[in-house]
Amino acid sequence: MDKIKSKNYKITDNIDLTKISTFNTLNASEEELKKSLEETREKLGEFQDVLYAHGKYSVLICLQGIDTAGKDSLIREVFKDFNSRGVVVHSFKAPSTLERKHDYLWRHYLALPARGKFSVFNRTHYENVIVTRIHPEYIISENIPGINSTKDIDEDFWNMRFEQINNFEKHISQNGTIIFKFFLHLSKKEQKSRLIRRIEKKDKNWKFSPGDLKERALWDEYQFCFQEAINNTSTSYAPWYIIPSDSKDAARLIVADIIYDELKEYNDIQEPELPEEIQSKLDDYKRQLKNE
C-alpha cells in the first residue's frame, strides 16, 4: 500500500481542479484499505481522549464536495471509535429565519467545538461562496446593506467574503482551534454512477432528488467555485486538502491518516499530570478504598 503523506494533498499554491486526479486506490485492496482505516480511527479515538483531558485545543473538520462525494459515509466511518461526547457533527442546510437575522458566519460560530472536542462541519461556511455564487439570488435574503439586487454582487463582493472567511479562521486558530478543510474531489462520471445507484436501490431512493440533476447540469460552475474558494482560502493556519474521492474506501483512509498525522505533531497535547501531593498519596488512597 502506498504511504499517505499529508503534503501530497495539502494545497500551498493555486491549483487547477481539472488537472488533479479524482481516483487513487493507494495500490491497495478494499480489505487492506478497511483494515488500515480501523487502525487509524482507533488511534484517533485515543487521541481524542487525550485532547479532552488536555483541554486547551479543539479540532474543526470541514468537509466540502459535490453531491454524492461521500461526506456522510466518511463521517460515519472515520469517527466511529470516538467517544460520542467528544465529537459533534453539524450538517448545515438552508439558513433558518433566525439565522438570516444574523450575518452568514454567526451560525458557524455557534457550532464551533469546545476545548477538548472535535466538530465536523458537513458542508460549511464555504457554502456562502459556492452555492450562493452560483445562485446569487440567495444573497438577497440575507438583507445586507447596499445589496438590493444580484447586480450589486460583483467580484469585489466575493473577494470580501474570502477575506472575511480567512479572518474568521485565523481568529479561531489563534484561540486554539486546529482546522482541517477537506475537498472531496469526485469525477462527473462517478457522480453519475452514484446517482443511478440511488435510483436503482430502494433503500437509497430517499437520498435522491430531481434537484440533484439540476445542480449536476451546473457541474462546471461548481468546479470553478470550489477552485476559487480553495485558491483564495488555503492558508498555513487553515489549509485545504484535496482528496481523490472516486474510491470511498481510499478517501476515508486518506482523510483519517492526514488528521492523525497532523495532530500528533502537537507535542504539547498530553494528558495532564496529577499534582505531586496527590501523586505521592495514591497508594494510601488505594488502601483506603480496599479497606472500606
Image (spheres, grey):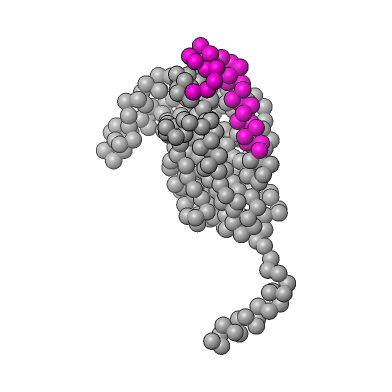
Residue 153 x, y percent position in the rendering: 53, 16
Of 277 and 265, the residue lying toward us: 277
- Residue 265, compared with residue 287, is above or below; it is above
Let me know if residue 68 appears in the view.
Answer: yes
Q: Main secondary structure of the magenta part?
A: helix
Q: Is residue 185 above or below residue 220?
A: below
- Furthest residue toward right: 276
* Residue 66 screen position, x and y as percent: 46, 29
In front of the other: 245 or 286: 286
Magenta range is 143-171
Identify which residue is drawn at 65% across, 32% down. Answer: 167
Q: Position of residue 11 (x, y in %)?
A: 63, 31
**Along the horizontal axis of the image, is 24 left or right of 233?**
left
Q: Residue at x 40, y 23 (%)?
A: 215
Which residue appears at 40% of the width and 19% of the height?
Answer: 217
Residue 27: x percent and y percent?
53, 40
